[in-house]
Image (cartoon, rainbow, N blue to C red):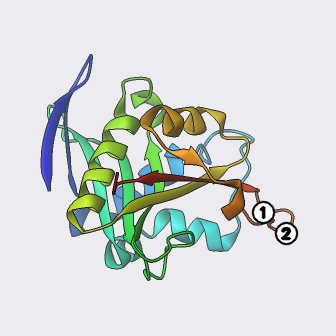
Amino acid sequence: MTATATTSTEPLIVRRARESEYAAVGELTYRGFGHHLPAADQPDSERLTLLVDAEARADAGTLLVAEDVRTGKLVGTITVLLHGSPLARQAEPGEAEVRLLAVLPEARRQGLGRLLLEHSVQLAARNGARGVVLDTGVDNLGSQELYRQFGFIRRPDREKPRPAPKVQLVVYTLDLAG
């Protein structure tokens, strides 16, 4: 899957990650979640493995990246998983799940998260999904706003309490059948 879009400052392409890029995508994901910042909370070992192991995400689904075509730098990523994937935690039969949407801090506020989300939803539809599900931290209000603007609907009926110190999650779905 390859598609091109132009943001206000840079030409970008969204495509599948290449095997040779997996380490860079892992670092991008880690940085995109802000764990590299001074005094940032560090993920537990299970979460850290999920963030940096881009190869596992590519094996379990489709690992997409956004590339600045002028510099060749990867600036964003997202993973699309079908129901039954070992890394899907919310997808029910007929749904695709998007996980680990991450954009480098210096590339934010240009519509890149929305662009990655668009490509993920299109990929899910092409793969026969009738809906898309995702989750995010209850305090991640910026991402929640993006999902609502895109048309996702919060589904409290699908939210499950998680033991501390895990972050509580909110679940959103998008109906592709209608």
Q: Residue at x 32, y 66 (%)?
A: 129
| Residue positioned most to the top | 8
Q: In the rendered image, which quarter is residue 128 located in?
A: bottom left
Q: Is residue 78 visible?
A: yes
| Residue positioned most to the right | 164
* In this rendering, position of residue 7 left or right of residue 32: left
Q: Is residue 172 above or below residue 86?
A: above
* In this rendering, position of residue 72 left or right of residue 92: left
Pick whichever, 80 or 104, lies toward us. Answer: 80
| Residue positioned most to the front | 178
Q: Is residue 75 visible?
A: no
Task: Report crowding for label 1: few under 14, some 14 to 19, many 20 or more residues within 10 A (C-alpha).
Answer: few
Q: Residue at x 76, y 56 (%)?
A: 168
Q: In the rendered image, which quarter is residue 45 located in?
A: bottom right
Q: Where does label 2 land, which residue? A: 163
Residue 64 in percent (x, y) is at 29, 56
On-image quarter of the N terminus:
bottom left
Task: Report crowding for label 2: few under 14, some 14 to 19, many 20 or more residues within 10 A (C-alpha).
Answer: few
Q: Separation of disc 1 and disc 2 at Cα?
A: 6 Å
Pick whichever, 100 or 131, lies toward us. Answer: 131
Q: Where does label 1 land, which residue? A: 166
Tell me the SS state at disc 1: loop
Q: Is residue 85 above or below residue 139?
A: below
Amino acid residing under circle 2: Pro
Residue 76 in percent (x, y) is at 36, 44
- Disc 1 and disc 2 in contact, CB within 8 angstroms: yes
